[in-house]
Amino acid sequence: MIEVVTLDDGTVLLDAHDVTDFDEVRGAQRALAEYRIDGFDTVHVAGLIAGDDVADNLDALGRINVRLNIHHLVVVGKRAHGMHRAAEQEGSWDGESIPVSDTAHAYDEITSFRGPRVAILVTGGVDVSLGDVVERLKGDRP
């Protein structure tokens, strides 16, 4: 389930931080891509997902980000870096995928993207709670 919130600065936050299933994350990526079609800059903040074949699924999700033309990917946690590698290998990306070690660094990266006509999707986080990132964004506190 995705909760959509417009933040004080005009950023649209798609909160799916508790979504850790491959198919649900893929669906959330498609929801974010709809904002891109509407002219928004798009950012996907993603953590580790659950289930079988995690490595293959992270690879697929990284490639889907590129294929959906999502503008930026911030991958949180070392165990989720397969998503970052896949996005970088997809071919057309160079620097749009940013691997970070923890939620503090993820928040720092996200702040540079915020503003009107920006949509940020937060998904995953089996090993790192991305709810912290969502709460900081909702609270507009540094």
Image (spheres, rainbow, N blue to C red):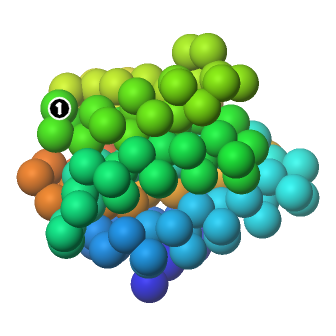
Residue 130 seen in this snapshot: no
Going by the numbered disc 1, the residue's amino acid type is: Lys
Does residue 11 appear to the left or right of 62 in the view shown?
Answer: right
Can you give x and y, in whole percent of width and height, for residue 79 in the image? Answer: 16, 39
52, 47: nearer the viewer: 52
62, 52: nearer the viewer: 52
Q: Quadrant of residue 12?
A: bottom right
Outermost residue on the top side: it is: 94
Outermost residue on the bottom side: it is: 1
* Residue in the image at 61% along x and 15% along y: 94
114 is higher (above) or lower (below) than 124: above
Does residue 88 appear to the left or right of 129 in the view shown?
Answer: right
53 is higher (above) or lower (below) than 107: below
Question: Which quarter of the image is occupied by the N terminus?
Answer: bottom left
Q: Quadrant of residue 27?
A: bottom right
* Residue in the image at 17% along x and 32% along y: 78
* Residue in the image at 14% along x and 49% along y: 128
* Residue in the image at 44% along x and 77% along y: 24
How many marks do you count on the picture? 1
Can you give x and y, in whole percent of width and height, for residue 123 in the image? Answer: 38, 60
Per the image, the residue denoted by label 1 is 78
Residue 83 seen in this snapshot: yes
Can you give x and y, in whole percent of width and height, for residue 91 in the image? Answer: 65, 24
133, 23: nearer the viewer: 23
Question: Which quarter of the image is occupied by the C terminus?
Answer: top left
